[in-house]
Amino acid sequence: MLAPGGTIGIVGGGQLGRMTALAAARLGYRCHVFADEPNSPAEQVCAAATVAGFTDREALERFAGAVDVATCEFENIPAASVRRIAAVKPVLPQPEILEIAQDRLREKDFLRSIGIDTAAYREISDPAALMRALRDFGYPAVLKTVRMGYDGKGQVSLTPEVGAEEAWRRMGAEVGILESFVDFVCEISVLVARGANAACATYPPVENQHVNHILDTTIAPARISSQTAVRAEALARRIAEKLDLVGVLAVEMFLTSAGEILVNEIAPRPHNSGHWTIDACVTSQFEQLVRAICGLPLGSVEHHSDAVMKNLLGHDVDRWRETLNEPLTKLHLYGKARARPGRKMGHVTRLSRRR
Ligand code: AMP
């Protein structure tokens, strides 16, 4: 167990790292962030920082020497860099889990191997293979990069009007994954926390609304039947157990009109759709991560309020002042200097009485 007073290393300087550091500070831990640019959202609230490229060996080793345990707040950290840290200090969730989540093919192969349904998918390595797969899958379909994709980056929707060559060029990577398009009724996600002692806790499923592939709004809990909620939580728990997870993990799922649940993605870190837990639950996803990786018991996942979380993207953030006058509303800003279109600048959580 790492007692309060110890140092948690956070790899990645974004808002997830920032909110993890805030939760850690409340429990008396120090945080040391590894970020690839100065004055990152996480650095602003951490006791120490290493600012270097994510492949800088010497900096990674210095960082590993300065912390007691480390966690990644961002999926696209090179696997070799994470392993370098893990050779010196524990990295939780374990690097093997991150490596599965970094690769959409490995991720879906893993999910299928443990009996979890996903959209139909196939590895694609050139436009001819894409054409053949489209003949089997039919339209519409979605072509994605296997690696380094997030918030819809490197993702191309395929309709008969878009040629295979053109789609391949737009995707812009050497290997892709073609998925059949899921005509979902809603997108939900479940956050699961698992401690070093294998205790597991799931937050209730939430409903996610995306705009331009970026999360816009999370409604917590999701407006789904209790049977569906139980199934979704059981899926998340199964994934966490099969991975032997220590930490938190988000499972993104599609709910179809036939009542099927298809898993789209897993993310072994706190998740944007879990931000509501800061204001509406006894224990936030960030505190849960700190507890899990430090070997403390997990906290209660009880929610005392319902919540609607809205991201402040780009210049939405300019309206921050108005939200301060709203009752039962909490404003969170990430300390980012420049508002670019689609950039996550902050979020607002609106609370209401539990249904
Ligand atoms: P992803 O990058 O896989 O998280 O995808 C981002 C968003 O694109 C998802 O949250 C969905 O809204 C949409 N999307 C991704 N894959 C599919 C699919 N196979 N069928 C329908 N929509 C999808």
Image (tube, grey):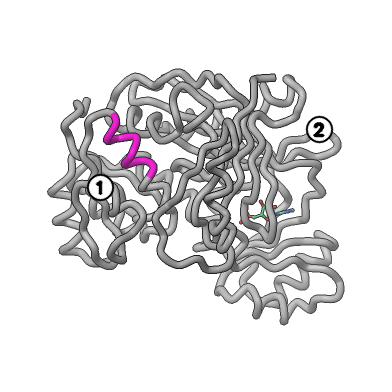
Quadrant into which the N terminus falls: top left
> Would you say 349 lies left or right of 86 here?
right
Q: Is residue 233 visible?
A: no
Q: Which mark is residue 46?
A: 1
How far is disc 2 from disc 1 in space, using C-alphas?
44 Å
Residue for point 70% across, 40% down: 262
Position of residue 176 in the picture relative to residue 274 (left or right): right
Compare residues 155 and 211 and report the one nearer the observer: 211
Residue range in magenta is 19-26
Q: Is residue 203 magenta?
A: no
In the image, residue 355 lies at what x, y percent? 70, 19
Which image quadrant for residue 149? bottom right
**What residue is at 39 percent from the left and 55 percent from the top?**
335
Please tell me how crowded label 2 is: few (under 14), some (14-19), or many (20+) other residues with Cα within 10 Å.
few
State how many labels appear. Answer: 2
Q: Quadrant of residue 30?
A: top left
Residue 282: x %, y % from top left:
46, 21
Q: Main secondary structure of the magenta part?
A: helix
Residue drawn at the location 27% of the way across and 56% of the way down: 34
For residue 323, say whether it is visible: yes
User: Is 292 drawn above or below residue 216 in the view shown?
Assistant: above
Is there CB contact under 8 Å for labels 2 and 1?
A: no
Residue at the disc numbered 2: 259
**SS class of the residue under badge 2?**
loop
